[in-house]
Amino acid sequence: MSRKLLLIPIAILLVVTLVACASPAPAPAPAPAPAITTTVTAPAQAPAPAPTVTVEVPAPVPTTAPAPPEVLPELHLKIAQAMMTKDTLTHLAVEEFAEVVNQRTDGKITFDVFGPEIGDWIELDVMTMMGTIDVQFNAHDPGYDPRWNATSLPFAATSFESAAAVTGPGAIFEVQGKQWAPDSGLYYLATFLNNLGMIGLNTPEPVLTPEQAAGVKIRVWPAETPKLYVAKMGFTPITIPWAEAPSAIGTGIADGWVGSGSVYHWTLFRDVAHIQLKTFDFMEMWDITTNLEMWNRMPAAYQEIFQEEAYRLSVKRLGQLEEEEAEYEQKLKDYGWEIVYMAQDYPDELAVWAGLAREVWVDLEPLIGKVWIDQVRVTLGMEVTR
């Protein structure tokens, strides 16, 4: 019995063994995946940092809109000359100045233009100082500033060519005038040479020497320069306003006059005299000036136009003088006048007159100022006195 019981577990073990042997073998384990190799490059070593620089940056400035363009004002001005008839080149220059300035300002500056109806030249000068007239083509009354006597120093220039050298833009008389004018309430734009001065006579015969000039009454304008040099030449000077000069000659109050050339002689004196001496004894020096207060109120754009046009007309005038003189000289000849060409026909007599007249340059130094006269001397190549 015990032997049977022992056989039972052995049988069971055999059955299990047979079953296990009959079962299929397990699938083999999968091969391991191939290794993945990744190359990693180490970063290059960074350079050493640059030294620290501290920069102060200004705070930003707030931006503003650009300023609007300047709006130029409209101006209505008065411009004048007081001596020449309206058909002369001098008056036409005044009209041209007004017209061109009007065009260049797109019509914003307009002018009233006046001529001989304005009165005597001294009155016009005062009107411009006071602002009644804004722009003048004129000379200046030395009664207000004696330095203006320098503009008529006798025998300073004895030809149109030599006169042009000292009366053009930037020349000595402009340099001086720009310094003097503000003291009279004026602004000096440019010199305007109206003509070279000559002597007109209503005597029976031409007067050619100091001896012949004795007792001959010559009208001069109200200034020390002509009074002194006309007396040095041997004449008797009489001060008469320019506007009254033709009637003074016609009535015998004076026997002749100094002042300007053939244009004046034709337009104002052709019926009261009959002899012209071409002495070229002084420069009839005008200029183009404005009232100073008016000038200072004008925008810079307008001032530039005024200056440019003044210079242009100054140069244009210098180119007109000889031809204009010849034209009116011929009119006088045709009218019966006797023309005496002193430099050509009587050079010795003219040299005597010039030498005597130039003596007044020294006499005028206390009145005008030696420094101003010396500047003119240097410019003309004359000896400077001590």
Image (cartoon, grey):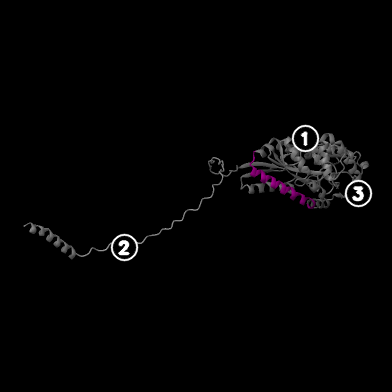
Image coordinates for residue 377, horizontal then vertical, percent: 84, 42
- Front of the two marks 1 and 3: 1
In this figure, which residue is indicated by the disc labeled 1? Answer: 145
Amino acid type, residue under disc 2 in the picture: Ala
As measured in the structure, the alpha-carbon distance from the residue carrying label 1 to the one carrying label 3 is 35 Å
Is 139 covered by the magenta stretch? no
Judged left or right of residue 113, residue 346 is right
Image coordinates for residue 56, horizontal then vertical, percent: 56, 41
The residue at the point 69 percent across, 48 percent down is 96
Q: Which quadrant of the figure has residue 33? A: bottom left
- Labelled disc at residue 347: 3
Mark 1 / mark 2, whichever is N-terminal: 2
Read off the magenta span: 297-323
Amino acid type, residue under disc 3 in the picture: Pro
Quarter of the image that includes the C terminus: top right
Q: Which quadrant of the figure has residue 66? A: top right
As measured in the structure, the alpha-carbon distance from the residue carrying label 3 to the one carrying label 2 is 140 Å
Residue closest to the far left: 1
Judged left or right of residue 164, residue 207 is right
Q: Nearer the viewer, residue 385 or 162?
A: 385
Label the magenta part by its dominant secondary structure: helix
Q: Nearer the viewer, residue 340 or 172?
A: 172
In this figure, which residue is indicated by the disc labeled 2? Answer: 31
Crowding at mark 3 (Cα within 10 Å: few <14, some 14-19, many 20+): few
Viewer can see residue 95: no
- Front of the two marks 1 and 2: 2
Q: Nearer the viewer, residue 331 or 223?
A: 223
SS for tag 3?
helix
Amino acid type, residue under disc 1 in the picture: Asp
Crowding at mark 1 (Cα within 10 Å: few <14, some 14-19, many 20+): some
